[in-house]
Image: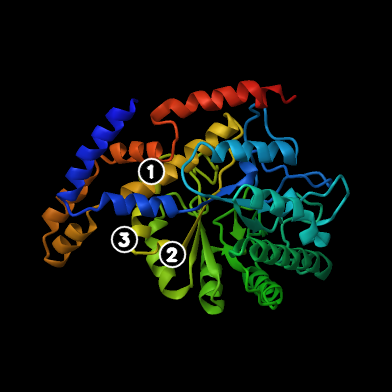
Amino acid sequence: MKKESVLKSYELAKEQYAALGVDVDSALKKLQEISISVQCWQADDVSGFENLGNLGGGGIQATGNYPGKARNIAELRSDIEKVLSLVAGKHRLSLHAIYGDFNGKVVDRDEVEPSHFKTWIEWANANGIKLDFNSTSFGHPKSGDLTLANPNPNIRNFWIEHTKRCRAIAEEMGKDQENPCIMNLWVHDGSKDITVNRYKYRQILEQSLDEIFQTEYRNMKDCIEAKLFGIALESYTVGSYDFYLGYGAKKKKIVTLDTGHFHLTESIPDKISSLLLFTPEIMLHVSRPIRWDSDHVVILNDDIADLAKEIIRADALKRTNIGLDFFDASINRIGAYAIGIRSTQKALLQALLEPIKQLRDYEANGQYFERLALLEEAKTLPWNAVWNYFLLKNDLPVGEAYIEEIRNYEKEVTAKRK
């Protein structure tokens, strides 16, 4: 699309939004400042770089075998740099503990240290990227069905030590980047079939968490992530939403809402306003479940649009941490990243452009027909003209032009990986 056409369309859109009391320039400024935490594991199908061998398990399953996945740290960093060159704004990178720079040495998970992420910190600083972190409970000989909720002290203490060390790593990342590192804790613990010890395992998990969180840090923030069920652990999940909601409210921890970790008919946006009343912040892991927690690439659908609207309507941008959590190995991985990030930004832009003052006035006055009518009309307002201008302002390809850039990167880089 020609620059002149983009500018003309933008001016017309800006005028139309202004008539509804929407400040487009303010919306674009806010969008520019929103940092999305991009997941490193889309680039290599959640394989990581430890030398223990990823044994799977824990409900983690990347499907597909599209050629060209990152095979080492250098390739993964190259892919991330390419992705971030295709999207507007300054974004973050979320690392799992299995992505350390171990230099070919065998380092078990209860031995990970900040030194194993020194080169990641250096790379992030050189590229103006902030880092977030995750403990890794899956794909290990000691994973089994239970980790932090395991009655066996040898297994449980192994994972407690691992998670403590992950918090220490996150603290060093946050200190170095002078911005808090968001440290997410998720364990897959559960049961394939009926358990008669629901209370017992949750009691153990609570005790493990209390021990893990004993050390107070200033440069990292703790998040605790729930799940409905895991693959091969369908009947019972120790760390359910109810469990983490109670723990988070009691201990003032950030509760992570993964959009793939709930029943498909549940409304994740509806949970945001409740959590904000009782927890300091929220963390979002944005994914697209199809029939189950399938981690499809995020697209601009009603689910992501409603999620973004609730954040903006609750005036919660400063208390909301937004991360992506999908790993689709069936398509070009760089393209998957670009689609997911851009779709999330589009949803946020739509939300920022909503004529919220007029809508709230209608609601306060009991004018429910008018409220519903304006909500419907807002769906077809020219937000796309504003989006194209946003890309143009950031010197990025407008419309579908980015597709060709990804094709070229595949031809020149990823297709040569055997």
Front one among 282 and 390:
390
User: Would residue 12 be found to the left or right of residue 340 on screen?
Assistant: left
Question: Does any portion of residue 281 appear in the rendered image?
Answer: yes
Give the residue drawn at x 55%, y 72%.
253
Vertical placement of 152 versus 349: above or below? below
Q: Which mark is residue 318?
A: 2
Q: Eyeballing the image, is 409 above or below 178?
A: above
What element does badge 3 sit on? helix
Quarter holding the C terminus is: top right
At 66% from the left and 37% from the top, the residue drawn is: 78
Tag 1: amino acid = Lys
User: Residue 245, relative to residue 21: is it above or below?
Assistant: below
CA gap, disc 3 to disc 1? 16 Å
Identify the mark nearer the N-term, 1 or 2: 2
Residue 414, quarter of picture: top right
Give the SS element for disc 1: helix
Label 2: element kind = helix
Q: Which of the two labelled residues, at mark 2 and mark 3, occupies the earlier sequence position?
A: 3
Task: State the image coordinates of residue 87 (x, y, percent, origin top left).
Answer: 48, 40
Residue located farthest toward the right when viewing the structure as drawn? 105
Out of 300 and 335, give the one closest to the viewer: 335
Total marks shown come to 3
Of the two numbered discs 2 and 3 in the rendering, the one whose residue sits closer to the viewer: 2
What amino acid is labelled 3 in the image?
A: Arg
- Sequence-first disc among 3 and 1: 3
Percent of width and height locating residue 397: 44, 31
Tell me the distance, in whole angstroms, between the alpha carbons under discs 1 and 2. Answer: 19 Å
Colour logic: rainbow
Checking the image for residue 313, the label placed there is 3
Q: Would residue 169 be found to the left or right of residue 127 on screen?
A: right
The local crowd at label 3, few if under 14, some if 14 to 19, many if 20 or more residues have their Cα within 10 Å, is some
Residue highlighted by disc 1: 346
